Amino acid sequence: MDNAIGVGKMGMMYEGFMPNGTLLAIKRLFDYRLFKRQFLLETTILCKYRHKNIIPLLGFCIEGKERLLTYAYMSNGRLSKWLNPLESEVIRLKWHDRVNIALGIARGLSWLHHICDLCVVHLNISSECILLDENFEPKISNFGEAKFMNPDTEDHLGRMFKANDGKKDVYDFGSVLFELITGKTYNELSHSYDTSNICGDPLSFYNVIDKSLSGEGLENEVCTLLKIACECVKALPNQRPTMLEVYNNISNLRKGRDGSSDDSYMLRELELASSITKDETIEF
């Protein structure tokens, strides 16, 4: 079909629009029986919560064998497209945008892990599931593998929480940071380079840095973000930071550059979280 804009594991994505001309992204599942759990997770999580760094779910449809999910349209598409463009494409992400994207993903994951009442772990973070709006604000999507962080009970979808689930998100986020810096994920780098040397001595990263960032006088900031990435991908989960710690570190990096930060905003949300009722929705 002419309005097909992509294909994923669960189904085809189509472009649609409202009568007022507002663009939509509509996912049509391949087989409702195979993706029953994923569909339920997407609707459970995205209908309940709204956050500036989580893809907005505008509606869904269940009719016979058809399963449709309708999202806000993200005009700049997947982050992976910008980090790994086709040879025929001349696109470039500026360093400022890369830091803001990293901060936004970390903000969204911190909110999911530490603030929303179900405490959600995503378990599938990659540049493929990060969508960018017209201002390059990142939106986390694809919640079909998510779990709820309840250490005492099995959730109503039959998914048991494990203590290190949250640290899986931290590792995956670290891999996305490597991709933002070098154009390659941590696993891709490990096939070609001694990643232990990069993490042991971040100054040795110059031969793997994205060439579009070279010569911009950003070495200190790139090195700082690389150190944060190395902390995230440590082999033992209990050695990795929490997503809130990661968010604060990246926020401090941006604060050091332009004197602004949303740390205080995050802290206020953490203080408020304990007083929020189960059915309330919060944003920051």
Image (cartoon, grey):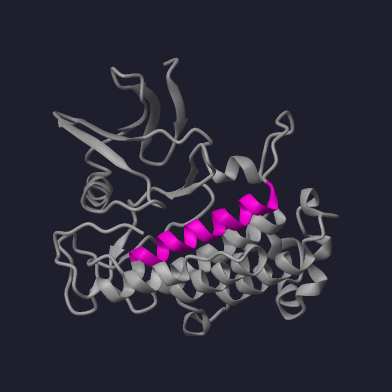
In the image, 139 versus 174, the foreground residue is 139
Q: Residue at x 34, y 56 (%)?
A: 145
Q: Main structural element of the magenta stretch: helix, strand or loop?
A: helix
- Where residue 16 appears, x then y in whole percent? 36, 22
Numbered marks: total: 0
In the image, 162 versus 277, the foreground residue is 277
Outermost residue, top direction? 2
In the image, 33 versus 11, the foreground residue is 11
Q: Which quadrant would the C terminus be assigned to in this image?
A: bottom left
Q: Residue at x 69, y 36 (%)?
A: 91
Q: Left or right of 226: which side holds 217?
A: right
Q: Is residue 153 above or below residue 28?
A: below
Q: Is residue 283 above or below residue 17?
A: below
Kindly indicate the quadrant of the structure image that contains residue 216. Answer: bottom right
Q: Residue at x 36, y 40 (%)?
A: 10
- Where residue 180 appears, x then y in whole percent? 64, 55
Q: Which quadrant would the N terminus be assigned to in this image?
A: top left
Range shown magenta: 94-112
Outermost residue, front direction? 259
Kindly indicate the quadrant of the structure image that contains residue 80. Answer: top right
Q: Is residue 93 above or below residue 114?
A: above
Q: Left or right of 265: which side holds 43?
A: left
Kindly indicate the quadrant of the structure image that contains residue 232. Answer: bottom right
Q: Is residue 182 above or below residue 203?
A: above
- Where residue 192 appears, x then y in whole percent? 76, 61
- Where residue 242 appears, x then y in whole percent? 45, 76
Outermost residue, bottom direction? 239
Magenta run includes residue 106: yes
Q: Left or right of 119: which side holds 132?
A: right
Q: Left or right of 130: which side holds 90?
A: right
